[in-house]
Every structure is written in structure tokens, then in C-alpha cells.
Amino acid sequence: MISTIKTILLVDDGKSEREIREAMRSMPPAAHLNEEVLETYVLGQSAPEETDAIEEHLLVCCECQDGLRELAQFITALRSTLCAEMVVH
């Protein structure tokens, strides 16, 4: 909600989309993405509008970037383990 209000204020000032994105990156994130949202995103199962919002948040939030990186590494390791087990059996 706060991000939406900030975006509306930036648009009302006649700023270009590029200027809006740059200004949004400099603003602290309103809230962090929870693990369920990150899981849905990394598995490619989030809705297009959710994906846009998640990606915008990830542009400015190092903590969520770290969480996403850790989750992606975990999923990659899990897939590798499962594939290796399938080959063995």
C-alpha cells in the first residue's frame, strides 16, 4: 500500500517510468517477502502481477535477495539429490 502511494505521488509529479523505478529502488522496502511467497516465485508459480511486485521488492531489499538466493540453492541441491537417487535406484 505504501509503495503504491509513493508510486502514485511520483507519477503525479510527471516522472518517467525510469525515474519512478530509480526512486523506488532508493526507498526502503515496506515489508519483507515471506518464505511462501519466495517459494512460489522461485518455482515460477506466482501470478504475473505478483511476480512484478516481487521483482520490484527484490530490486531494493538485500535481505529478501539473500533469502531468495538461499532458497534457490536449497532447491537446486534438493533436485540434484533426488536426481542422483533416481539414477542409483
Image: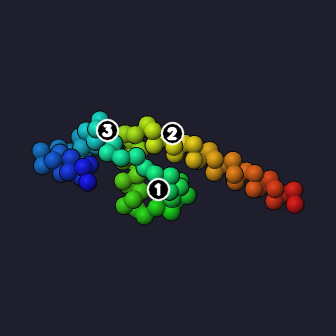
Instruction: Depth check: give the residue in front, 52 or 3.
Output: 3
Q: Quadrant of residue 62?
A: top left
Question: Is residue 39 at least partly visible in the picture?
Answer: yes
Q: Helix or strand or loop: what does disc 1 sit on?
A: helix
Residue 59, percent across and down? 39, 42
In the displayed structure image, the side of residue 14 where residue 31 appears, left or right? right
- Crowd around label 2: few <14 · some 14–19 · many ≥20 (10 Å): few
Disc ID at residue 37:
1
Q: Earlier in the sequence, mark 1 or mark 2?
A: 1
Residue at screen point 75% across, 51% down: 81
Q: Is residue 56 left or right of residue 17?
A: right
10 Å neighbourhood of mark 1: few (<14), some, or many (≥20)?
some
Look at 36% across and 46% down and name the residue there: 31
Q: Which residue is mark 3?
A: 28
Residue 66 is tagged as 2
Q: Nearer the viewer, residue 64 or 46?
A: 64
Which three-letter amino acid code belongs to the residue tagged 3? Pro
Work out which residue is located at the far right of the displayed protein and give it. Answer: 89
Q: Earlier in the sequence, mark 1 or mark 3?
A: 3
Q: Position of residue 61 (x, y in %)?
A: 40, 40
State yes or no: discs 1 and 2 in contact (Cβ < 8 Å). no
